[in-house]
């Protein structure tokens, strides 16, 4: 028996509570409350519009993702990996053979991806991150059983079945030939598990997640590894988009696990570290602007920050209110980018060394910020951007793709 799409009852409750409290507030606070209520009403209306607009996209593309193959790391043996068949392995994107020292340690060429690197495990993980959220969105929108059955087959293969599951660690991610067998910054590869975890969370909310205990046990083990291993602690101490993506992963996995302590840790990290080290008063992100792909890296980090903020806010933590003493905030970072998303020809910095013409996409940072602030122009900008790409570089750097999972 199928169950239909749920009405997000919290939307109506928010309006009711806001209206009841307005009359009891002093004049100044009442004005601010009216503004907040107006933003909330606009947000609710836009969320409904997004859900309805997504229906034909999700349903129209469903056949492709229903037939997507189930493959995990065990299907692709990495000959240079020191781990076993269940251990995830990848090699650094920007590391190349040294022409002056053949056979020696690889050297770095920032922004230039080596096409010969081993990335079969990451491509399988990206495939999971494209398939499961799409199927979960279809389940939420249509109530159909088939997408639910198929997504659970994928989850079981990756996280439950002993013969096919991935080991819950990234000891050997983003290895550099001749230098190391894995690095802390390789943890950014599992950024593609954020929306998988969100999909599992939304399905579990409906009491429909088969093998929920086993799936959660895998994410608990991986989260514990992230927070205690040498690689995990190294990545935690990074300062740029790696730090943002680390905290976003912790938050997404903690949400699935109902781990309030870790969600509080993420909120503190956003308030005390991420914003102060990465976002200036006017919203620019100097660490990303210094890269050889300043446009796409700045988009990417804003995407991770806004998703983290949206998630934490949805879990009852006022993350959109967080700002540095100088005024830097996630919303301001997105607003700084907005004119260059609207008109990339106005970009005042160097063009990216690769794939500059493939951006922007339908950046979820625009949607989340528009919903939080009531910015209609930003919302309309988001609506008009392309939602899907088949360019591998773009797919790799847009891990948050399914608005239905984040709204309904």
Image (cartoon, grey):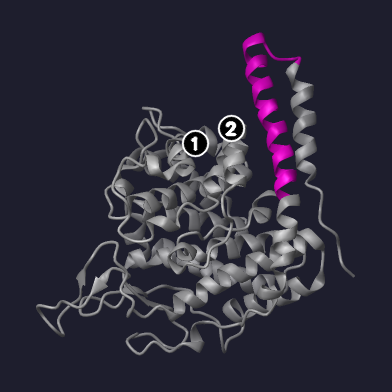
SS category of the residue bearing label 2: helix
Q: Tell which of 214 and 314 is nearer to you.
A: 314
Q: Is residue 246 visible?
A: no
Q: Are marks 2 and 1 in contact (CB under 8 Å)?
A: yes
SS category of the residue bearing label 1: helix
Question: Seen from this angle, which residue lies furthest right?
Answer: 1
Left or right: residue 251 versus residue 12 is left
Report the quarter where the N terminus lies.
Answer: bottom right
Left or right: residue 174 versus residue 329 is left
Left or right: residue 334 versus residue 276 is right
Q: Which mark is residue 308?
A: none
Question: Seen from this angle, which residue lies furthest front?
Answer: 345
The residue sitting at 72% across, 51% down in the picture is 53
Q: Is residue 57 above or below residue 31?
A: below
Task: Mark 2 or mark 1: name the one nearer the start of the chain.
Answer: 1
Residue 235 is situated, as x and y percent measured from the top left of the image, at 35, 60
Q: Tell which of 128 and 342 is nearer to you.
A: 342
**Residue labelled with disc 2:** 373
**Residue labelled with disc 1:** 331
- Specify few, some or many for label 2: CA neighbours under 10 Å numbering under 14, 14-19, or 20 or more: some
Within the magenta stretch, is there residue 28? yes
Residue 364 is situated, as x and y percent measured from the top left of the image, at 55, 49
**Magenta residues, start to end:** 23-51
Q: Is residue 254 above or below residue 272?
A: below
Residue 187 is situated, as x and y percent measured from the top left of the image, at 40, 65
Q: Tell which of 130 and 312 is nearer to you.
A: 130
The residue sitting at 58% across, 86% down in the picture is 162
Provide the major secondary structure of the magenta segment.
helix
């Amino acid at each position: 028996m199928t169950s239909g799409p749920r009405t997000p009852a919290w939307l109506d409750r928010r309006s009711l509570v806001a209206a009841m409290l307005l009359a009891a507030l002093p004049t100044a606070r009442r004005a601010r409350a009216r503004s907040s209520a107006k933003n909330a009403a606009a947000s609710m209306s836009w969320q409904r519009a997004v859900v309805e607009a997504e229906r034909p996209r999700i349903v129209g593309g469903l056949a492709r993702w229903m037939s997507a193959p189930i493959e995990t790391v065990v299907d692709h043996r990495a000959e240079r990996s020191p781990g076993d068949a269940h251990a995830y392995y990848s090699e650094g994107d920007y590391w190349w053979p040294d022409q002056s020292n053949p056979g020696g340690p690889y050297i770095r060429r920032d922004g230039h991806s080596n096409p010969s690197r081993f990335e079969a495990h990451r491509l399988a993980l990206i495939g999971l991150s494209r398939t499961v959220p799409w199927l979960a969105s279809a389940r939420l929108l249509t109530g159909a059983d088939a997408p639910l059955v198929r997504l659970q087959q994928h989850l079981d293969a990756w996280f439950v079945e002993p013969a096919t599951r991935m080991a819950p660690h990234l000891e050997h991610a983003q290895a550099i030939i001749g230098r190391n067998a894995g690095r802390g910054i390789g943890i950014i590869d599992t950024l593609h598990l954020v929306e998988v975890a969100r999909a599992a969370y939304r399905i579990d909310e409906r009491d429909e997640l088969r093998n929920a205990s086993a799936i959660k046990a895998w994410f608990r083990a991986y989260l514990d590894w992230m927070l205690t291993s040498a690689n995990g602690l190294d990545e935690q101490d990074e300062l740029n988009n790696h730090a943002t993506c680390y905290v976003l992963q912790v938050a997404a996995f903690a949400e699935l696990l109902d781990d309030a302590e870790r969600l509080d840790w993420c909120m503190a990290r956003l308030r005390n570290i991420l914003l102060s080290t990465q976002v200036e008063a006017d919203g620019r992100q100097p660490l990303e602007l210094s890269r050889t792909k300043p446009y796409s890296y700045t988009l990417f980090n804003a995407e991770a920050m806004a998703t983290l903020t949206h998630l934490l806010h949805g879990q009852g933590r006022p993350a959109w209110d967080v700002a540095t003493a100088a005024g830097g905030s996630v919303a301001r970072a997105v607003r700084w980018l907005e004119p260059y998303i609207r008109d990339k020809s106005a970009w005042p910095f160097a063009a990216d060394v690769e794939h500059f013409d493939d951006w922007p996409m339908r950046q979820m940072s625009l949607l989340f910020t528009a919903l939080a602030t009531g910015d209609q122009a930003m919302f309309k900008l988001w609506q008009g951007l392309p939602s899907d790409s088949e360019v591998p570089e773009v797919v790799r750097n847009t891990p948050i793709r399914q608005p239905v999972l984040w709204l309904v």
